[in-house]
Amino acid sequence: MARFAVRRFMSMLALLFATSVVVFGIFEIIPSYNPARAIAGRNANATTVKEVSKKFGFDKPFYAQYANTMKLIFTGQIVDYQDQLNVVDQFKQKFPATLSLVIPAGIIWLIAAIVLGSVGALKAGKFADRALMVMAIVGVSIPVFLLAAVLLYLLAYKTSVFPNTGYVSLTSSPAQWAYHLILPWFSIALLSIGFYSRVLRGNILDMINQDFVRTARAKGLSQRDVFSRHVLRNSLMPIITLFGLDFATLLGGATLVTETVFNIPGIGQYEAAAIGNLDVPPILVGAMFTAFFVVIFGAFCDLFYALLDPRIRLSG
Amino acid sequence: MAERLLEVDNLQVSFATEDGVVRAVDGVSFTLDRGEVLAIVGESGSGKSVTSMTLMGLTRGVNSHFGGSAKLKGKELLSASEEDLEKIRGAEIAMIFQDPISSLSPVHRIGDQIVEQIRAHDKKISKGAAFDRAVEGMERVGIPHARGRARAYPHEFSGGMRQRAMIAMALSLSPSVLIADEPTTALDVTIQAQILDEVKNLREHSDSGIIFVTHDLGVVADIADRVIVMYAGRVVEKGTLDEIFYDPQHPYTWGLLGSVTRMDREPPKRLPSIPGLPPSLIKAPKGCHFRPRCPHEFDRCAEVPPLEARVSDAPDHLDRCWLSVEDKRSRREVEGRIGLVKDTVAV
Amino acid sequence: MALDVSRFRRGNGQTSSTEDPPAQTTQDPSFALPESGGTLARPEPVTGAPRAPEPEEPSTVGVGPYRLAVRRLRRNKTALFFAGVFVLIVVVCLLAPIYSQDIAKISPNATNVTGTVNGHNVVSTSGVPIGPQFGAHYFFGADEEGRDLAVRLLYGGRTSLLIGGVATVIILLFGTLVGLLAGYFRGIIDAILRPIMELIWSFPPVILGVAVGTALALGGIGPIKGNSVFIPALIIGVIYIPYLGKPIRGETLRLREMDFVDAARVQGMSPRRIMFSEILPNTMSTIIVFAPIMLANAILLEAYLSFLGAGVQPPNASWGTLISDGINYLDTTPTFALIPGAMLVLTVLSINVFGDGVRDALDPRAQVKIQT
């Protein structure tokens, strides 16, 4: 267990390092990119740009800039170029909105996928299964912003069932919080439900033909017990891995499209704005934030795996 | 006379597949009494496993179709409801499978898997009591330190121990019929012998009827009372152990027997085998299914030979071959042993 | 829908679970009869594709795996129908200049804020564009600058399809190449290529694409100008290279250990020849399965990038930019966003359904990571 933790921590450091170097490097490579100009403003003259450049250390070599930026990030003093706001504070302030968006969406899509995937497998070839197939393939064919647009048009503009956009924090009014977030939740969840349930369905169908499932039936277990105790349990594992990675990237800001469309002040919207302004610090912190969650959730998945399957040992 | 446990009459099982209808079992009949060991012998795809699994209702599905009848103590199994079958499975008819590692759930403890079976049939028994019974059962089949081992997972067991656990599980509710589907095939030779001893032990100490499904005639000689030889979905010969081994009537049985090397004879120059492959069960050959591989076939083989007694003094020794008993006796001996080699046969 | 027949057969597998296992594990040969009746297995053709589909009915013996796949695909009417839809969309989009000149009689970038059509303002005084007119002019309505949406839809389709196509070519060429090189040579080449692929792969494509897209849109890269449509094509291509490169690498690693590769090596074939004439043909079914998925994902990612302003730059249009523009008028002129959206979804859906049919026909067991 200790070895597992240490190895995971090492791989997290490696991934954080690689991610930060690459993100930093991308902007270094771009010939036309000049952060000093961005900070100084469009109409600034050459001397101002030079001063800004000196002040932020943009005239120093790549590795010195990188080291300086990393120092600022890990001491929590990094500020964005655009408004000179502390990036870490911004993340702290905006993270609750992203959590409010991602966690319920994740729960909806995982539960729906398990239910629908099971139905699809048990009714293989029948109408429910085909409907699921259609849903899965439509799900991977619609961009989330378009689904959001359709939902908004139908349920917010045409029928006013839900508010069009905006965000109310959970602490101020739980009912309003949920009311405002239902459309965003489903925008995120609907597209993944089809794909996940399809994968689960395939796993279940493979599992049903396993010898130990035949044994379970031969023991005289009821169909429900055979399914829940033997088939489903073994079929869930690949789904958990998929979910871990997807959920981690969502927490890290992959919600930028959804947050932009629904005007939710989370880190996705913050990052979208930063990307638009080519504001490196928030992009960099966002990328590292994602890498952090990817490793953490990878470790969670492995722990969960080990819990589900005694053959797996945690070696990292 | 011992109690009649099973009565299978003209059992037919077919599966609809994309490529056509597979007639996996075509008119199989047999009976099983208490305390008796019946061996069903045949190659892969001969229908022996389908037959045994059909008795447990494990071949049911949207694409499967059944005919004939199979009665357990007079109760029809083919038309029984799924609920009734669930009550029968594991309690009245239990099954031991071929490959214990894939047949045991990898994610549940051995003891819990046995407990699960006990509790599926006895809703009132406590978990602790069921566990004690599971441990007892494991001890009975020779698993040492059973109480501790019951908490282990299948991957922590050796192959032989796994199969013992499988047997303990099958016996946990003292079923009247035990089906062993190639229980030794996936095991090492030394372990095979131990497991066979366990089955023999069972034959002596319980009054269950045992169906032993195998492709291995060497094993059959050791434990069976009666033998059914299946080929391509049909029974080609059936009789007592002695009848099958000492007076085999069907050329396919000769082939099977010829393929067994014997310690008391000179070793053959090359390992004998039956030439050719079993036929597709979608487009089975007309007439005798064995005809394409049989060196003794003649024009009459285009008709399906009935399964009937042909040896005058053995009314229960049935076979499905048009050759006369005298012809058979003169043709089956090759180099002093039973064989199926074409070039030594003068037709 | 006929897409799922092979899975259905497998899934409902009462047949497969009840047949005796085809392969027996080790046993003492002197004690048991040979299960296969004693005939020797037919020798495998040395360069035959090892990923041949599941055993078929006797009539297909001797038919190559690709002809078999084509035969199976031809039976899949749903897949064929959607392939037809896709071809139709491509043809219609290619005809954009003709529609623009001869029917709508307006160029895709011509603004017309003050004009009228059928007695209505093209753009109302409050700035709301007109909805569909279903006539020669403004068939699908106008955008916020009074440009003809139908014309822009077709031109935008050309752009989206072009970017998707170019990106797919990049993915197929370089994904295959990188996978072959890393898998065949291993060692230092793999040590360099694999981490790069892993790194790109672990980023959500949208975030990576938007960041790079925004940056490159400013100054372009090398000879390509910032507002060129080849910038998003290049970015999308590079982002998805690992999605093909990783599986090809894995397959190459497996194939290079196989006997027919050893045989080629013993014959003195050069590594280049072994890679391209021995290993590459055997990875072809994977490449074919991935091609439609990659095309669909490339078109989708283009839409994401353009929606976020990091893809196609004005005044050019793509389906993504049209949706992005139209989403602001969802309450007044919903068709502005929803018509380009419908075109986008129909296109991607057609490719995906066809791709699914191809996958089922070639290799019913393929597992593919579909993600945007």
Image: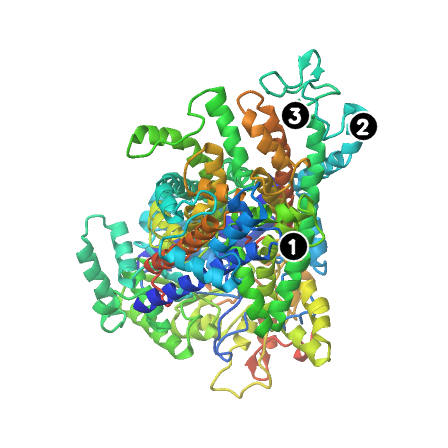
- Which quadrant would the N terminus of chain C be assigned to in this image? top right
> Foreground: A12 or A178?
A12
Question: Which secondary structure lies at badge 1?
Answer: helix
Assess disc 1: are there few (<14), some (14-19) or many (≥20) residues with their C-alpha within 10 Å of its C-alpha: many
Q: Earlier in the sequence, mark 1 or mark 3?
A: 3
Residue bearing mark 1: C171
- The residue labelled by disc 2 is C101
Q: Is residue B267 above or below residue B39?
A: below
Task: Bin the neighbour count of mark 3 within 10 Å (Cα to Cα): few under 14, some 14-19, many 20 and up.
Answer: some
Which mark lies nearer to you, 1 or 2?
A: 2
Disc marking residue A298: none
Identify the residue under disc 3.
C145
Which mark sits nearer the N-terminus, 1 or 2? 2
Q: Nearer the viewer, residue C22 or C238?
A: C238
The chain identifier of the residue carrying mark 2 reads C
The answer to which of B90 and C101 lies nearer the viewer is C101
